[in-house]
Amino acid sequence: MKFTWKIGGEAGFGILTSGLVFSKIANRLGYFTFDYIEYPSLIRGGHNALEVVVSDEEVHALKQDIDFLVCLNEDTYKNHKHRLSGNAFVLYDPEEFSISENKRQKISVPFKKILSDLKGQPVMKNTIAMGATLAVLGSDLGILNEIIERQFIHKGQEVVDFNRQFAALGFDFIVKNFKANIKPLMPKKAGDETFVMTGNDAFSLASIIADCRMYCAYPMTPSSSVLTTMASWQDKAGIVVRHAEDEISVINTALGSSFMGARSAVGTSGGGFALMVESISFAGIAEMPIVIFLAQRAGPATGMPTWTEQGDLLFACFSGHGEFPKIVLAPGDIREMVKLTVKAFNLADIYQTPVIVMSDMYLSESHKSIKQQFLTSLINEYKIDRGETISELSNSQLSTSNKYLRYQITEDGISPRLIPGVKGQFYQANSYEHIEDGHTTELAESRKNQVDKRNRKNQTYLKTHFEAPSVYGNLEESDSVFVGWGSTMGSILEAQKVLNAKARKTAFIHFNHIYPLAREKVEPLFKDKKRYILVENNSQGQFGQLLMMQTGIEIKEKILKYDGRPFWPEEIADHIINNT
Amino acid sequence: MSTIQDFSGYTPSWCPGCGDWGIGIAIKTAFSQLGYDPSRIMVVFGIGCSGNMNDFLNAYAIHSLHGRALPNAIGAKIANHQMPVVAIVGDGDCYGEGGNHFMHACRGNHDITVVVHDNGVYGLTTGQVAPTAQKGFKSKSTPSGIIDTPINPLTLALTQGASFVAQSFAGNVNHVIEMIKAGINHQGFSLVNVLQPCVTFNKINTYQYYLKHSYKLEQQYNKEDFNEAVKRAAEMTLQDKFPLGILYQIQRPTYTASLPQLSAGTLLEKKRYTEYDKLIGDFK
């Protein structure tokens, strides 16, 4: 069982909240969901829409057909009718517009009349629609009523009851007038407990699991909800969240906290990241740990703020002037987001250098089901590893004159980092080139020694913590092999299912440890003569360029999409079928 | 008890006669008189001749980027608010490149002390104008004289919410010591703007110039009077008169004191939070 439910209406009327409520209900009933929102960079006016794919198996991406369309205005129908499946349900109010096509299951609900009869506000149309939806799906109002209570109880029981009656009216209207259309697609079933989280939620939760104590940001779509989520948790979790004056201040505030010994992170999107870049270089030479969450949107410049793209990959990998080590990770879904974020905090401490966790609007703002069991075991297994972060000194860390050497030359490139405040010692983190004790230098040999020391951290990372890409499907048995990175994972996995159903076996090499790349761990996956197809949500095949640069592997066939929209699994599958 | 010597790092490389020598001595003396030792104080340096003090002063320190010392200082204070944090910066550094950070640090009343070396020029890059340069000042970057009027750091700090605003003169080391000590003792954002002759590149704002154009605030001056403070600060812009002393000081809760999560101890000391169930509830 798999269907897409979509709701649309004017911006500012609660469309996005309704979508999340629907996802939560489906999960509570034992189903898996994946959702996707479309909204303009406006608060009021314009068209908002949200679609939820519901299935009894895990869902990784959208599907092209809409099976259930809730139209809170005429635009919803006009904009999305071309995607309706043959027998789709269309919920609408005939007082607002009429539908001439006959093949759909037209379900007319008098939203306007119900609202005016009971003096409801326009935003309550959603609640009527939700009640009606649950009726058509043969469900009940139990969970919806609970959610309404949770949402409004702080305003009093009267407000709860007032909202609930709209859900009941929508529900009853269907039962009374459209009994024949009711199709129990979502009966309650037993299953593992699941939650719905976005990529941003996953980053936020993982940061707390990793004991991040300082989060600093300036709002920028699509990263902003990390700031607001972390801020809403700060009293509970005892962390500090600073909304600073600009992204330059953001990263430098976090670096100040990091220097003092607190795990610190920042979050932004392309433009804000651009402002941070000078300080990424600073963190590189001064060897201060920092986790940077970069949620991409369609650029350049202001670009398309609320749409998706993987256009900042090379910029992130090569951000910062000068040469210094840096680690870039790009989770493919929320599970990987949790896993790689907790790892990122360890890597930042171990290598004392910037670690960038890349997301994009599609991953950052789409809700996906995640099993409670997954989170519980991750929490139990996760060990905080602060590497060579120390608060006591041993003799080997001191110079002959008993001075602590902050930038001690070591074989693996990692110098013990003393938490400031230890009695009898002091040192500086220096943005200038420096000698072992941190003092500024311009001497040729000292310079070379420090550059080599920092570069050795790269080699240590590639040997110790780099993970080779995951392979989905059977590489040996497949002629066609997709190559992707980050958030395209879901669409490619679903495309593989579509192709599999047509007896086309494919494999998929998914990278999430993006930069630097360990050539010897990647090469074996590309040794056979196969049809490799690069799939990227950008126009220049940036990962393909990076792969070529770092490993010498060139992929000629590419599926690139850069219209601000994520991939449909169907379009990836069609590419294989149509280009054989 | 620490001595000035405990804070002395490498021998300074400033030009002979530079005002930075006086400020350097004053900072070390102030730290020592306050009873600190280099392990108990945090200093963030900007970039410029002032920032070069990083190698001459012993302390836990960050030698930051040009303009970025203040956010580093704010972050350090948030992580360990029990450690005194001092930013040592220049006028181009703090009022030019880092001007935005300066305004917002005042607003937040972050408990940091900002010591600005105000010499009107960019010494380290060989004498171009700083935002504090007097109108008409000729430099390599403004051969016909600067068109812009100078920034007034004191009125700027006052109007953006700084709770301590003082000015001193590098030619009077004892006065600089007193101002820095008062700034560090003040709970909240403190600015100590130090008028500092650049003997190499600024032939106008010399020691003699400041001796002639500056005056000490009188004994009965009321430093809690905001309007009076703005009036005195404006004299720099309107009359080329430079008041010396604490122009303004009020008590207002600091940024870290306003964070309930830091009331029991520092951010570093707190126990790791592990009640994830309370957070996960939001996603059900």
Image (cartoon, helix red, strand yellow):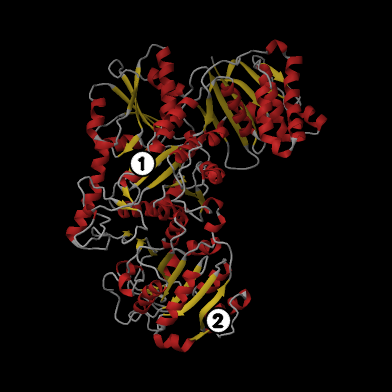
Residue A143, x across and y down, in percent: 65, 24
Q: Chain of mark 2?
A: B
Residue lying furthest right in this view? Answer: A117
Q: Position of residue A17 (x, y in %)?
A: 62, 33
A132 vs A410: above or below: above
Please report the residue visible at 42 percent of the width from the left and 53 percent of the height from the top.
A257
Q: Do discs 2 and 1 belong to a common subunit?
A: no
Residue B92's tag is none
Q: Height in image: A506 above or below A323? A: above
- At 35% from the left and 77% from the top, the residue drawn is B25
Q: Residue at x 36, y 65 (%)?
A: B47
| Direction from residue B248 to residue A210 in the image, left or right | left
User: Secondary structure under badge 1?
Assistant: helix
The amino acid marked with disc number 2 is Glu
Residue B225 image point, x, y percent: 62, 76
Instruction: State which quarter of the image contains the N terminus of chain B.
Output: bottom left
User: Is disc 2 placed on a helix, strand or loop?
Assistant: helix
Give left or right: position of A275 versus B283: left
Give the numbered dot on residue B235.
2
The residue under label 1 is A346
User: Dot 1: few (<14), some (14–19), or many (≥20) neighbours within 10 Å?
Assistant: many
